[in-house]
Image: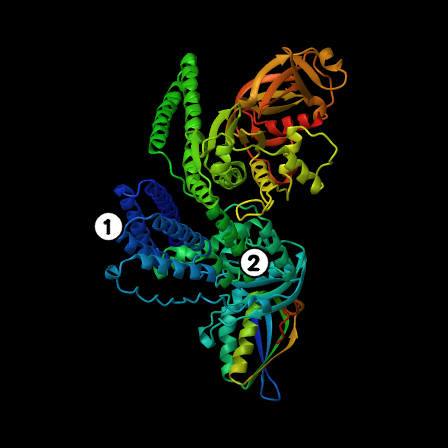
């Protein structure tokens, strides 16, 4: 198993590396397009193709290697300057780049499966086109024939002998007594008849094939075994317990009734999705007892010594079935469960690249923590109270620092992703006959890596929209008195408790009339009603909404903004639209800083403690009860002349009991909206590790997780963005 | 060890033995030697176990063994009477002699 994992790991590295190579190839190609004699770019593209070719061969992805080889042939010519770089050639190379990406995706997800027809034909076409670029003299010999694939047949599963052994609702118990049972003063009869009291022995058969003949047989040794069908409601462990005394002198196999096989399979399916060893899994559901597992593990060790193989090669599951401790059905269910968990793990386990400096910093801090730790230990043995306090403060300061830098490791600057869109903008603007320049601001803004990955698709969609609908053709633009080249800006920055990403263009802005007309046409709006900009823009996020006059292959099919919105909301973010006629459109995405550990702010509501993300807390204030109660027509307070909606958390959570005289108000802000939360008491800042809520609680709306306090009590983490949204919807 | 064997010859030349005492692990070795030896020199063996007052699984095993030996050498092996303890055991194990 270890080998398989290793191989998987290597392959993962291969895929990650190849993707990175492709990214740099794309950059170089785009650079080359601007400056066609840039030798560095040419060399870098060549190196990419060469490395991909080499690696692909090594990992057994021959087809990718084959393609890269043809590509490399052409690139050699560009290096020798026998082929001149033309825009046409760059176009082709970009297509090849995309195709390699397709190949990588294919082999990563489907491994050995052959390519589909579409890819196969694209493969041939591109190869042909590449070869056409190569001058005849340079043409190298034909590629070797594809190696024949050998099919290794997996060990077929053996016939199911268990079927015969089990009668429908009976346990099958198989006993083989040790030779010395009689001499030890034990009588199998007493055990078996005791078992008979626990249920009903349906069938019993004595077996004594091992008993020698004639004078060889020693009458004081036990050669007996019993096979029996036992009907009872007791479980496996209890059956085993009956034979507790003879355990060391007896070989016992207990197979569950058919009816409970189904039950075991169900139990296996219900096991939590955590990686588990087969043995542990079976033990958990009660189909295997501790003793059985021990025996099996011993057997595994013995066998491995015998066959001089590492114990991992001799699967416990197989031993269990061979030794008739469990049925094959159950093992199969457990195995497939294990496989599923592993698969999920593998898909979760992606490699990320970490800045070496960040890692060094972290290691440094850990080193210091170790020193401080031993310091604390030393001082704590003395009576120096002050010293202990100081050392502990030092240590918690270090822990905080470590927390911050550990969290930082997952953070990646978004600029890398932004610059990848350069290609999208290039291809699109060409296709549309437009001239668009991509401007990137705040590329150094750091985001959680997983967040960035999930943002990529929605962002591409927004960029397409801007290029397709937002920015006009050079002629149109000049008519409007704007420079011919449009500017598309990607901007990222931090704001209270959230990260903001803006996609803006300097185009014509949204057309109110056509949105309204379309909305009326599609039944979202009424024609005679006056809508504010915000209300109108909301229609854009409706599924199926599109204002494009003609459907292009880029956008206008009405599948889009609703998906963007859904994607962003699944990341607990929000999307906003701002547009000014003639000046352009901005789509703003707000995302919460989702980190596993947050600086929290703890409050008390009735007897429960709640934690808010400190980032979102802007201020705290005190208020008299009468001031809250005497409001007419809505929950608003006056905060230094500002109207602030508030929520009485006590009422919200339907807490009973005495209200405090002076409730406190915590003002929280998210995506430029503020509300006040009225709570009983403020506890203060609190470093929190967010524990996700279990599956059962996934429907709970206002809580985003829980945390465990130093006292062992549980505190809930309030979902501030949702609360704010709720309060503003109530308006 | 309490064991007594009474030899009787019956009409059909079978050896008829009446056992008294215990048929347990303590007597099994001795009993096995005697009975196996007797079986060798007679065409068939008939046992009367009515007066066996103690028996355990070792005794049960011995009877199974003798039956198998007799079958193997084409001799008859019968048990005419059995005391209640042995009887119970055979019923329980669902075996017949």
The residue at the point 62 percent across, 23 percent down is A609
Q: Position of residue A31 (x, y in %)?
A: 34, 40
Q: Is residue B2 visible?
A: no
Tell me: A19 left or right of A259.
Answer: left
User: Relative to A682, does residue A239 appear above or below in the rendering?
Assistant: below
User: Relative to A590, does residue B68 appear above or below in the rendering?
Assistant: below
**Quadrant of the snapshot with the N terminus of chain A:** bottom left
- Locate residue A388: give its quadrant: top left
Q: Which mark is residue A81?
A: 1
Rate crowding at label 1 as few (under 14), some (14 to 19) or many (20 or more) other CA atoms within 10 Å: few
Q: Chain of mark 2?
A: A
Rate crowding at label 2 as few (under 14), some (14 to 19) or many (20 or more) other CA atoms within 10 Å: many
- Locate residue A33: give its quadrant: top left
Q: Secondary structure at mark 2?
A: helix
Q: Which mark is residue A330?
A: 2
Tell me: A606 left or right of A8.
Answer: right
Are callouts 1 and 2 both on one chain?
Answer: yes
User: Relative to A277, does residue A700 appear above or below in the rendering?
Assistant: above
Q: Position of residue A397 (x, y in %)?
A: 43, 20
The one nearer the camera, A155 or B15, is: A155
Q: How many numbered circles does the render carry? A: 2
Q: Secondary structure at mark 1?
A: loop
The one nearer the camera, A718 or A574, is: A574
Q: Position of residue A305 (x, y in %)?
A: 36, 58
Q: Position of residue A491 (x, y in %)?
A: 47, 30
Label 1 or label 2, whichever lies nearer to me, is 1
Q: Is residue B47 visible?
A: yes
């Amino acid at each position: 198993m270890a080998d398989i994992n290793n191989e998987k790991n290597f392959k993962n590295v291969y895929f990650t590396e190849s993707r990175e190579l492709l990214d740099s190839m794309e950059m170089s190609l785009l650079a080359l397009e601007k400056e066609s004699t840039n030798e560095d770019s040419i060399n870098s593209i060549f190196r990419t193709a060469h490395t991909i070719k080499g690696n692909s061969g090594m990992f057994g992805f021959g087809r990718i290697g084959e393609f890269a080889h043809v590509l490399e042939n052409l690139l050699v010519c560009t290096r020798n300057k026998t082929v001149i770089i033309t825009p046409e050639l760059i176009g082709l190379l970009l297509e090849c780049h995309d195709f390699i990406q397709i190949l990588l995706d294919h082999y990563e997800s489907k491994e050995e499966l052959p390519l589909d027809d579409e890819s196969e034909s694209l493969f041939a076409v591109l190869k042909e086109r590449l070869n056409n670029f190569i001058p005849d003299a340079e043409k190298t010999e034909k590629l070797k024939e594809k190696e024949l694939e050998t099919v290794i047949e997996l060990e077929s599963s053996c016939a199911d002998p268990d079927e015969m052994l089990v009668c429908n609702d009976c346990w099958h118990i198989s006993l083989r007594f040790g030779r010395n049972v009689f001499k030890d003063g034990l009588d199998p009869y007493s055990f078996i008849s005791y078992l008979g009291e626990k249920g009903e022995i349906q069938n019993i058969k004595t077996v004594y094939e091992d008993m020698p003949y004639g004078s060889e047989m020693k009458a004081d040794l036990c050669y007996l075994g019993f096979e029996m069908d036992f009907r009872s409601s007791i479980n496996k462990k209890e059956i085993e317990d009956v034979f507790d005394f003879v355990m060391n002198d007896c070989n016992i196999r207990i197979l569950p009734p058919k009816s409970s096989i189904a039950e075991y399979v169900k139990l296996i399916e219900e096991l939590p999705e955590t990686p588990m060893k087969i043995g542990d899994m079976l033990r958990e559901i009660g189909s295997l007892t501790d003793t059985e597992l021990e025996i099996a593990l011993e057997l595994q060790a013995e066998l491995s010594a015998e066959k001089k193989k590492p114990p991992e090669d001799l699967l416990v599951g197989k031993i269990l079935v061979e030794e008739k401790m469990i049925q094959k059905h159950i093992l199969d269910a457990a195995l497939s469960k294990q496989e599923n968990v592993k698969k999920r793990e593998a898909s979760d386990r992606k490699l990320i690249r970490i800045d070496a400096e960040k890692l060094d910093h972290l290691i440094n801090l850990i080193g210091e923590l170790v020193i401080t730790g031993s310091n604390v230990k030393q001082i704590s043995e003395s009576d120096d109270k002050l010293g202990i306090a100081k050392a502990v403060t030092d240590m918690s300061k270090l822990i905080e620092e470590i927390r911050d830098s550990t969290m930082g490791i997952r953070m990646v600057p978004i600029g890398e992703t932004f610059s990848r869109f350069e290609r999208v903008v290039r291809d699109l603007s060409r296709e549309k006959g437009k001239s668009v320049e991509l401007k990137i601001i705040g590329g150094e803004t750091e985001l959680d890596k997983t967040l960035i990955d999930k943002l990529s698709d929605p962002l591409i969609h927004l960029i397409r929209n801007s290029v397709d609908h937002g920015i006009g053709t050079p002629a149109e633009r000049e008519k409007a008195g704007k420079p011919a080249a449009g500017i598309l800006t990607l901007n990222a920055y931090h704001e209270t408790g959230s990260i903001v990403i803006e996609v803006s263009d300097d185009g014509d802005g949204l057309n109110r009339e056509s949105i309204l007309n379309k909305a009326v046409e599609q039944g979202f709006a009424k024609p005679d009603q006056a809508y504010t900009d915000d209300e109108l823009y909301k229609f854009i996020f409706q599924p199926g909404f599109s204002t494009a006059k003609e459907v292009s292959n880029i956008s206008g099919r009405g599948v889009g903004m609703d998906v963007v919105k859904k994607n962003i909301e699944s990341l607990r973010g929000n999307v906003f639209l701002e547009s000014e006629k003639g000046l352009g459109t901005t789509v703003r995405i707000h995302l919460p800083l989702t980190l596993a550990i947050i600086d929290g702010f703890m409050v008390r509501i009735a007897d429960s403690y709640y934690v808010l993300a400190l980032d979102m807390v802007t201020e705290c204030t005190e208020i008299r009860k009468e001031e809250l109660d005497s409001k007419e027509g809505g929950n608003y307070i006056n905060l230094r002349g500002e109207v602030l909606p508030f929520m009485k958390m006590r009422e919200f959570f339907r807490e009973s009991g005495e209200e405090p005289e002076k409730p406190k108000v915590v003002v929280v802000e998210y995506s430029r909206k503020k509300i006040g939360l009225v709570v009983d008491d403020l506890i203060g800042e609190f470093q929190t590790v967010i524990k996700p809520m279990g599956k059962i609680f996934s429907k709970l709306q206002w809580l985003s997780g829980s945390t465990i306090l130093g006292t062992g009590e549980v505190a809930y983490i309030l979902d501030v963005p949702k609360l704010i949204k709720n309060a503003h919807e109530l308006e | 060890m309490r064991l007594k064997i009474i030899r009787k010859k019956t009409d059909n030349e079978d050896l008829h033995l009446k056992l008294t005492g215990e048929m347990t692990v303590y007597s099994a070795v001795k009993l096995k030697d005697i009975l196996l030896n007797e079986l060798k020199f007679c065409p068939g063996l008939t046992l009367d176990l009515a007066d066996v007052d103690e028996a355990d699984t070792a005794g049960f095993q011995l009877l199974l063994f003798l039956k198998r030996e007799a079958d193997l050498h084409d001799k008859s092996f019968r048990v005419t009477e059995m005391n209640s303890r042995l009887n119970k055991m055979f019923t329980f194990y669902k075996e017949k002699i």
